[in-house]
């Protein structure tokens, strides 16, 4: 379809009704208690037995997967992946974990009562304090250059395994225990507006399906519409997905393929939590290996800022495999409840579309209209077997390369529409 035709059909499509605003979930985190351990200055982390990623991979050294825990049962579930003999006297199990070619390391705070409910600040790595967590997390990621990050924390009462979809660049957080009781800076990411959303990069449904099939002692689900709670759980979750976003370039030596957060129910036992961590980790490694097996997906053509004060972001989650057929486009940082039109073409281009930049060369083919949720995000599955992607003149096939972009309504600004950046995808068998 030529772009002239695409432009003609966009106007009625963008008038589609918006989604109803989703209700926020209650804060599932434990409120601050009086059991406060003083926060001391932390020394720099010493090198561990695990090998950093990056340029060292050229020498055949293994990439690292980072796990973090907060509060029982999560700190106990990841303890065996600690390289610190004082924390893990039974010995590190993460070296070339399961023979898969990855070193798995973990960091977590400890508490005087390992079965605590209202736990206070704790001691050790990543204690329950915003400033300490930020310093530690930066040191840990700088040391290991992780290819994947899974952050865990305690969630609601029950036996749940809750894979979080949403993390927010909050300006205001639940106070921690020691002054200053808010993060500094807040919001953490100065490159985005306050309250901007970062979606998980984990294979959420695959994790839920795998845990449900293999670990009968938990109830896994995806938290689609809520948030991470606004306390240290969401803070470290945001740090993880933010690190991944900053290191999402497949051509960079420190490429981080995926990151995201899991809330674990308070009633999940330590052994069951450990089993579910193993299943989650194995599923994430499958996801990483699948992505590494295909040519990298490349973002290009920066978006023009829209009425959210940020540029609309287009990325993808999943594996660009024709046979697997699980890839989906992720649009973020567009106006809430707005409708948009994803489209694709065979080449790169440079032109104008609404208030933004047209980055895809024709002939262009439109995909079904999508509608952003109340947080300004769209998740758009690509059905590679159905028209137009699977049938017709612009059908994708293994070995072909296509550029994708999304055009969206932006009422009251300029000509009333804008566009995301573009994403170039080469499909594999």
Image (cartoon, rainbow, N blue to C red):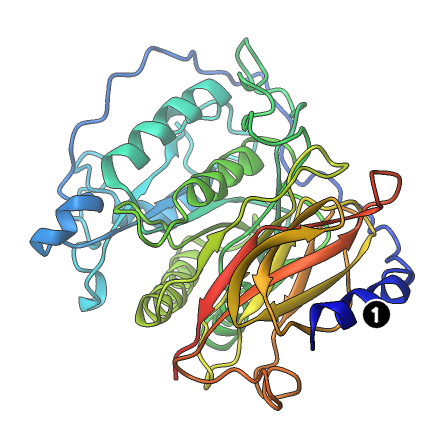
Outermost residue on the bottom side: it is: 391
Residue at the spot x=67%, y=41% of the render? Answer: 28
Which residue is tagged 1? Answer: 9
In this picture, residue 158 sits left or right of residue 45: right
Residue, x 53% and y 38% (percent of image)?
Answer: 238
Q: Measuring from the top left, give residue 128's x and y in whole percent.
A: 48, 26
- The foreground one among 240 and 315 is 315
At horizontal 25% and vertical 40% (from top left) the residue drawn is 144
Quadrant showing the C terminus: bottom left
- The answer, for residue 164, to whether it is visible in the render is no
Residue 2: quadrant of the picture? bottom right
- Using a 10 Å C-alpha cutoff, classify the residue at mark 1 as few (fewer than 14 neighbours), some (14 to 19) or many (20 or more): few
Residue 162 shows in the view: yes
Residue 292 is situated, as x and y percent measured from the top left of the image, at 32, 66
Which residue occupies the foreground of this view, 235 or 16?
16
214 lies above or below 350: below
Horizontal and vertical percent position of residue 358: 63, 55
Q: Quadrant of residue 235?
A: top right
The spot of residue 156 in percent (x, y) is 64, 47
Q: Quick one: 276 or 20, which is closer to the camera?
A: 20
Residue 407 is left or right of residue 161, and the answer is right
Image quarter where the N terminus lies is bottom right
The total of numbered circles placed on residues is 1
Taking 359 as reference, is 306 left or right?
Answer: right
At numbered mark 1, what does the secondary structure look like: helix, strand or loop? helix
Question: Considering depth in this image, is 392 or 237 the residue closer to the camera?
Answer: 392
In this picture, residue 318 sits left or right of residue 83: right
Furthest residue toward left: 59
């Amino acid at each position: 379809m030529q772009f002239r035709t695409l432009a003609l059909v966009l106007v009625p499509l963008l008038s589609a009704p918006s989604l109803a605003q989703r209700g926020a979930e209650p804060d599932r985190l434990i409120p601050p208690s009086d059991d406060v351990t003083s926060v001391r200055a932390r020394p720099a982390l010493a090198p561990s037995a695990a090998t950093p990623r990056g340029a060292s991979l050229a020498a055949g050294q293994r990439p690292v997967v980072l796990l973090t825990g907060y509060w029982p049962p999560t700190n106990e579930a990841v303890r065996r992946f600690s390289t610190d003999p004082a924390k893990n006297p039974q010995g590190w199990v993460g070296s070339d974990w399961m023979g898969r070619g990855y070193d798995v390391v973990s960091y977590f705070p400890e508490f005087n009562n390992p079965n605590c409910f209202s736990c206070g600040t704790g001691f050790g790595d990543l204690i329950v304090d915003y400033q300490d967590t930020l310093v530690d997390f930066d040191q840990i990621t700088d040391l290991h250059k992780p290819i994947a990050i899974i952050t865990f924390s305690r969630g609601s009462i029950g036996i749940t395994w809750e894979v979080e979809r949403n993390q927010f660049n909050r300006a205001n957080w639940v106070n921690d225990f020691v002054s200053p009781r808010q993060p500094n800076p807040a919001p953490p990411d100065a490159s985005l507006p306050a309250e901007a959303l970062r979606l998980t990069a984990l294979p959420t449904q695959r994790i839920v399906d795998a845990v449900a099939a293999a670990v009968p002692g938990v109830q896994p689900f995806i938290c689609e519409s809520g948030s991470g709670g606004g306390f240290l759980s969401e803070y470290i979750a945001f740090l993880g997905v933010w690190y991944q976003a900053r290191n999402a370039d497949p051509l960079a030596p420190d490429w981080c393929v995926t990151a995201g957060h899991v809330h674990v129910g308070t009633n999940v036992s330590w052994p069951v939590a450990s089993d579910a961590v193993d299943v989650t980790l194995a599923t994430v490694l499958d996801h990483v290996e699948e992505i590494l097996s295909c040519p990298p997906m490349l973002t290009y053509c920066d978006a023009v800022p829209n009425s959210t004060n940020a540029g609309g972001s287009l990325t993808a989650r999943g594996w660009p495999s024709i046979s697997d057929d699980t890839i989906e486009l992720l649009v973020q940082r567009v106006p809430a409840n707005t409708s948009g039109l994803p489209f694709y073409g065979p080449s790169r281009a440079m032109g104008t579309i609404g208030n933004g930049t047209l980055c895809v060369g024709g002939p262009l083919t439109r995909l079904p209209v999508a509608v952003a949720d109340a947080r300004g995000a769209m998740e758009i599955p690509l059905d590679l077997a159905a028209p137009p992607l699977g049938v017709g003149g612009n059908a994708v096939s293994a070995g072909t390369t296509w550029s994708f972009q999304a055009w969206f309504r932006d009422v009251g600004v300029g000509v009333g529409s804008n566009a995301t950046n573009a994403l170039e995808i080469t499909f594999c068998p």
